[in-house]
Image (cartoon, rainbow, N blue to C red):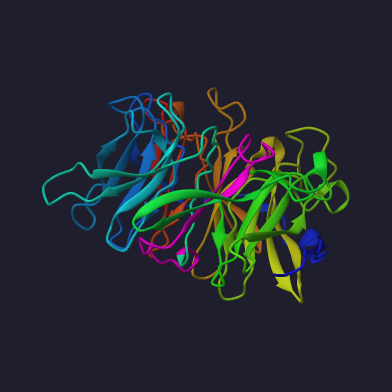
């Protein structure tokens, strides 16, 4: 386990941090418009065949559903199928994972009928659309689930093996101190159960020096360590990046690897709100914050104050943070504000979304959001709400998905024909 060290590379603050401007570099294709009252808050899961899976609210039962999006033949129009409707078995599944047999796993929020649930969806026989749901475990009462689940091999792009433990986090008011917890889902003899592996705000009393209010899911490295971010607490009270490591005694030890706002005026970012990405070759982590930037920030919507994309690189027992890009550097945040949803391609380019900023529209007074890339500098690839009534979507906030041809896929919370969001593709 590496020791925490709040080091920041100064080069990241003086070069390569300006968000680019100019004409948008990608072309928008709306692949699917969600029906009235069915917005999505989950990212897309892409399997080895190029099929996408996701979850959305409402649907036939009003409790949410799981959908499948695929092309019947190469180059044909995308087709979307509702493969499972939630009812009293849960409410709105979050981001999904898939095992080597094609089964899907996910969690639902706590519903009026009881706690959230951990479920498995099994593919149907040919010619049948609906999948078979199996309830595997109940989540603890009072949970506030964060989107992403992780497992061994996920950072390497491998499918879940179907048997090893799964890990995630819950936000406030979960945990022993009501400031969030990390948990495991493991099976013994075919029976799954939740276990609390760490309670946030366990040190520093009300200051929560170990972090509080986890805001992103977990990422696992090849040694079995888990990494995540929490938007509050830490040495400077503006959030942390942390590591959870097996302690050899059947439990877990937590260490803060970076406390944000370590640089005057929070130039290194504050309120980290995204999952961390892991480069398994170098051990470098990548993430985003919702606040902070290149100047003193007194309130929201100040230029240069709406978040950063950063890297955390291991360095001799500590970690060095480098700011890779800052946001809201243009008037009215035309370059985007509050980055999240990061993914990384094989060349090392980062892609993400901002849920606001971009183009101001009558139904998007703070902007419809953007898709961006980071390769030394940040470039806006697309700004939403270009079409009448934001029919191209607005407010993206979930993780993007990439295909081998460099096309970008994602979802928005709103916009589209019914203002319930869209599934989109961006092509270079």
Indicate yes or no whether the magenta region holds residue 249.
Answer: no
Residue 72 is left or right of residue 297, and the answer is left
Q: Nearer the viewer, residue 115 or 271?
A: 115
| Residue 68 visible somewhere in the drawing | yes
User: Residue 383 at what x, y percent from top left?
Assistant: 53, 41
The picture quadrant where one finds residue 118 is top left
Asked if 71 appears above or below 62 in the picture, the reply is: below
Residue 100 is left or right of residue 331, and the answer is left
User: Residue 373 at what x, y percent from top left?
Assistant: 57, 56
Query: Residue at the left extreme?
Result: 127
Quadrant of the frame with the N terminus: bottom right
The stretch of residues the image draws in magenta is 154-182
Residue at the image position 66 percent from the left and 51 percent from the top: 229
Q: Nearer the viewer, residue 365 or 220?
A: 220
Residue at the image position 77 percent from the left and 64 percent from the top: 4
Indicate yes or no whether the magenta region holds residue 177.
Answer: yes
How many marks can you see?
0
State the predominant SS element of the stretch in magenta.
Answer: loop
Quadrant of the frame with the C terminus: bottom left
The picture quadrant where one finds residue 364 is top right
């Amino acid at each position: 386990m590496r020791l925490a060290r709040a080091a920041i590379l100064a080069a990241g603050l003086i070069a390569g941090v300006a968000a680019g401007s100019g004409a948008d570099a990608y072309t928008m294709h709306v692949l699917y418009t969600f029906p009235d009252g069915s917005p999505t808050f989950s990212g897309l899961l892409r399997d080895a065949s190029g099929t996408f899976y996701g979850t959305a609210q409402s649907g036939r039962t009003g409790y949410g559903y799981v959908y499948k999006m695929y092309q019947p033949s190469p180059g044909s129009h995308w087709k979307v199928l509702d493969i499972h409707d939630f009812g009293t078995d849960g409410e709105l599944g979050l981001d999904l994972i898939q095992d080597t047999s094609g089964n899907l796993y996910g969690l639902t929020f706590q519903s009026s009928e009881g706690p959230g649930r951990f479920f498995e969806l099994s593919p149907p026989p040919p010619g049948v659309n609906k999948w078979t749901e199996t309830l595997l475990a109940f989540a603890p009462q009072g949970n506030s689930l964060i989107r992403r689940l992780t497992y061994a091999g996920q950072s390497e792009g491998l499918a879940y093996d179907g048997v090893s433990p799964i890990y995630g986090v819950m936000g406030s008011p979960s945990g022993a101190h009501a400031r969030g917890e990390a948990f495991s889902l493991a099976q013994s003899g075919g029976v799954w159960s939740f276990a609390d592996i760490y309670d946030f705000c366990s040190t520093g009393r009300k200051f929560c020096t170990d972090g509080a209010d986890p805001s992103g899911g977990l990422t696992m490295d090849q040694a079995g360590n888990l990494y995540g971010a929490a938007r509050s607490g830490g040495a400077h009270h503006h959030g942390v990046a942390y590591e959870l490591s097996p302690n050899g005694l059947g439990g877990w030890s937590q260490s803060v690897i970076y406390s944000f706002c370590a640089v005057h005026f929070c130039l290194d970012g504050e309120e980290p709100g995204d999952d961390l990405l892991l480069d398994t070759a170098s051990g470098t982590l990548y993430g985003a914050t919702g606040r902070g930037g290149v100047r003193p920030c007194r309130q929201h919507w100040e230029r240069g104050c709406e978040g950063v994309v950063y890297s955390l690189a291991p360095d001799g027992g500590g970690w060095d943070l480098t700011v890779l890009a800052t946001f809201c550097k243009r008037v009215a945040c035309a370059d985007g504000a509050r980055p999240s949803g990061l993914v990384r391609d094989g060349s090392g380019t980062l892609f993400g979304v901002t849920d606001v900023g971009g183009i101001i529209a009558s139904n998007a007074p703070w902007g419809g959001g953007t898709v961006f890339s980071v390769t030394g500098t940040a470039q806006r690839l697309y700004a939403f709400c270009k079409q009448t009534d934001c029919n191209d979507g607005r407010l993206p906030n979930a993780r993007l998905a990439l295909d081998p041809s460099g096309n970008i896929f994602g979802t928005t919370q709103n916009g589209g024909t019914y203002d319930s969001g869209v599934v989109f593709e961006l092509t270079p």
